[in-house]
Image: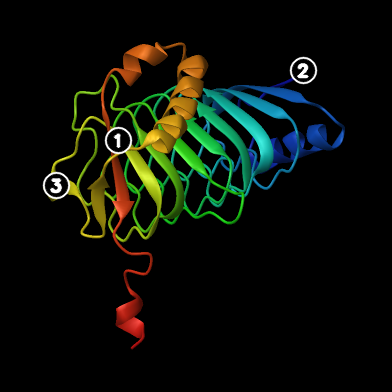
């Protein structure tokens, strides 16, 4: 394991140090005293792991392709921006636009997230991006979602599990929310659907991984029912531009 003390290091210099270690074949890098440095792990394609002690800055894991990043603290905005593959684990809260245009890999957030999480997520062939949020989410959860899976658990939060305009513009993918959501909070493009056996297999798979990562009781989480949110139409805006 390579240990780097990030205290006082400019974000560009820190990212160059990380890339150099990856090029040398280092499989595990431990970053101490991270304090807002941006773009950690961006664009890296490697079978390696970065462990972060502290709070990384915006756009962590953007365009990432295979790396694992584990944050021993909170994350900021735009984690996993256009991420292609790999895994992100955050032992705390995270900010807005998590998984923006994400097209592969998995993101696990132990606690709550901000606005527009999962916006423009998409999938292609065998690439199915997944975001699991342990707490609650703000407005526009799953906005313009075109593919992938969002799972929202509502654990250890004192606010509504999700904000307003949930699923607005959604035209692909699926959302699973533990508990229920009032109809007025939903975008007009989505509807509640009954769960089938396939849905339960998907939910169980990712909730079990969440439980292992954050040392919580899988069976306790699964005692509560989930709802499934699915888009009405694969091309909700087609009529605006074509006859």
Q: Where does the C terminus fall, quadrant-wise?
A: bottom left
SS of the residue at dot 1?
strand
SS of the residue at dot 3?
helix
Q: Position of residue 135 (x, y in %)?
A: 32, 27
Q: Residue furthest right?
A: 24
Which label is found at residue 177? 1
SS of the residue at dot 2?
loop
Splitting the image into 4 quarters, where does residue 196 fall? top left
Mark 1: few/some/many CA within 10 Å (<14, 14-19, 20+) = many
First of labels 2, 3 by sequence position: 2
Front in this rendered view, residue 54 or 162:
162
Name the side, left or right, on which 9 lies relative to 18: left
- Visible residue check, residue 88: yes
Name the side, left or right, on which 73 lies relative to 223: right
Distance from disc 2 to disc 1, alpha carbons, whole Å, reads: 38 Å
First of labels 2, 1 by sequence position: 2
Q: Position of residue 30 (x, y in %)?
A: 68, 21
Front in this rendered view, residue 229 or 109:
229
Q: Position of residue 100 (x, y in %)?
A: 47, 51
Q: Where does the N terminus fall, quadrant-wise?
A: top right
Q: What residue did someone put label 3 on?
A: 183
- Visible residue check, residue 94: no
Q: What residue did someone put label 2 on?
A: 1
Mark 3: few/some/many CA within 10 Å (<14, 14-19, 20+) = some
Which label is found at residue 104? none
Task: Judge whether 202 appears above or below 233 on screen.
Answer: above
Name the side, left or right, on which 240 lies relative to 102: left
- CB atoms at circles 2 and 3 under 8 Å apart? no
Q: Residue furthest front?
A: 197
Task: Judge whether 167 appears above or below 15 on screen.
Answer: below
């Amino acid at each position: 394991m390579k240990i780097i003390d990030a205290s006082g290091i400019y974000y560009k210099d820190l990212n160059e140090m990380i890339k150099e270690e990856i090029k040398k074949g280092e499989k595990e890098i431990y970053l101490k005293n991270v304090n807002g440095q941006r773009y950690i792990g961006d664009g890296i394609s490697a079978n390696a792991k970065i462990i972060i002690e502290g709070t990384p800055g915006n756009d962590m894991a953007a365009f990432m392709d295979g790396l694992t990043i584990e944050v021993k603290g909170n994350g900021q905005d735009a984690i996993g921006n256009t991420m292609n593959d790999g895994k992100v684990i955050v032992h705390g809260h995270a900010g807005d636009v998590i998984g923006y245009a994400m097209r592969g890999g998995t993101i696990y957030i132990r606690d709550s997230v901000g606005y527009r999480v999962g916006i423009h997520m998409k999938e292609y062939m065998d690439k199915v991006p997944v975001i699991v949020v342990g707490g609650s989410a703000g407005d526009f959860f799953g906005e313009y979602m075109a593919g992938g899976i969002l799972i929202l658990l509502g654990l250890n939060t004192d606010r509504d599990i999700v904000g307003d305009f949930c699923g607005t513009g959604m035209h692909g993918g699926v959302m699973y929310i533990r508990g229920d959501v009032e109809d007025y909070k939903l975008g007009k493009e989505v509807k509640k659907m009954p769960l089938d056996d396939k849905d339960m297999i998907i939910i169980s798979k990712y909730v079990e991984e969440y439980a292992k990562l954050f040392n919580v009781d899988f069976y306790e989480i699964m005692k509560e029912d989930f709802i499934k949110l699915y888009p009405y139409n694969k091309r909700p805006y087609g009529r605006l531009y074509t006859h």
